[in-house]
C-alpha cells in the first residue's frame, strides 16, 4: 500500500498557449507528472528507487539495445538511495555511467518493479467479484 509520502506529484507548467494569451479557453487539462519512491524486492530490500510513475508507455515499450535501455533509465529512473558497488556510490541514473556500473540483475529487477508499479490498477479500480 502506498503512503502519501511516497508520491510526489509535479504539475507540468507550460508557457501560456496562444489561445490563452488571446483570452480563449485552453485546449484541455495537463497531465501531472507523478514521481514515486519504491523499495526493490529481494534480494535488494534496502535499495530504493525514485521513478517517473506516469511516464509515457512508449519509453519502456521496446528495451532492445543499449541506446533504448540508457534512454529509459535516464528518463524514468530519477534517483536512488546511495546504491554502492566496489568503486563507491553509483552516479545518478541520468548519468550514462550508472548503467555501465549497475549489475544486470539489479537493473532488470528495477525495471520489473517499475513495470509492475505502473501497470497495477489501484484497488478502487480493480474488478470485484459479484456475490
Image (tube, helix red, strand yellow):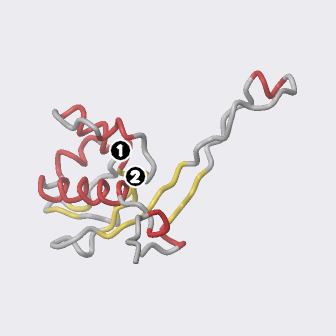
Report whether 34 appears left or right of 47. Answer: right
Q: Which mark is residue 94?
A: 1
Q: What is the x, y in percent for residue 95? A: 32, 43
Q: What is the x, y in percent for residue 98? A: 25, 48
Q: CA distance from mark 2 to mark 1?
A: 7 Å
Q: Which mark is residue 82?
A: none
Give the answer, above or below, for where 84 lies relative to 52.
below
Out of 63 and 131, give the one closest to the viewer. 131
Give the answer, above or below, for where 16 lies relative to 116.
above
Residue at 48 percent across and 56 percent down: it is: 35
Around disc 2, counting alpha carbons within 10 Å, would you say few (fewer than 14), some (14 to 19), or many (20 or more)? some
Q: Secondary structure at mark 2?
A: strand
Residue at 18 percent across and 73 percent down: it is: 42
Residue at 62 percent across and 49 percent down: it is: 11
Q: Secondary structure at mark 1?
A: loop
Quarter of the rendering containing residue 100: top left
Which residue is label 2 attached to? 78
Furthest toward the right, the residue is 23
Residue at 43 percent across and 54 percent down: it is: 53
Upstream in sequence: badge 2 or badge 1: 2
Report whether 3 appears left or right of 107. Answer: right
Labelled pair 2, 1 in contact (Cβ < 8 Å): yes
Q: What is the x, y in percent for residue 59? A: 34, 37
Around disc 1, counting alpha carbons within 10 Å, would you say few (fewer than 14), some (14 to 19), or many (20 or more)? some
Give the answer, above or below, for where 107 lies relative to 16.
below
Give the answer, above or below, for where 13 lies relative to 116.
above
Amino acid at each position: 500500500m502506498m503512503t502519501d509520502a511516497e508520491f510526489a506529484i509535479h504539475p507540468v507548467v507550460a508557457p501560456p498557449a496562444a489561445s490563452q494569451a488571446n483570452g480563449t479557453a485552453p485546449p484541455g487539462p495537463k497531465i501531472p507528472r507523478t514521481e514515486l519512491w519504491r523499495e526493490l524486492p529481494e534480494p535488494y530490500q534496502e535499495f530504493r528507487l525514485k521513478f517517473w510513475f506516469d511516464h509515457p508507455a512508449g519509453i519502456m515499450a521496446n528495451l532492445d539495445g543499449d541506446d533504448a535501455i540508457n534512454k529509459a533509465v535516464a528518463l524514468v529512473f530519477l534517483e536512488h538511495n546511495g546504491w554502492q558497488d566496489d568503486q563507491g556510490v553509483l552516479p545518478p541514473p541520468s548519468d550514462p555511467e550508472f548503467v555501465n556500473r549497475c549489475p544486470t540483475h539489479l537493473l532488470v529487477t528495477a525495471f520489473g518493479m517499475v513495470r509492475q508499479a505502473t501497470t497495477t490498477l489501484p484497488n478502487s479500480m480493480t474488478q470485484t467479484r459479484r456475490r
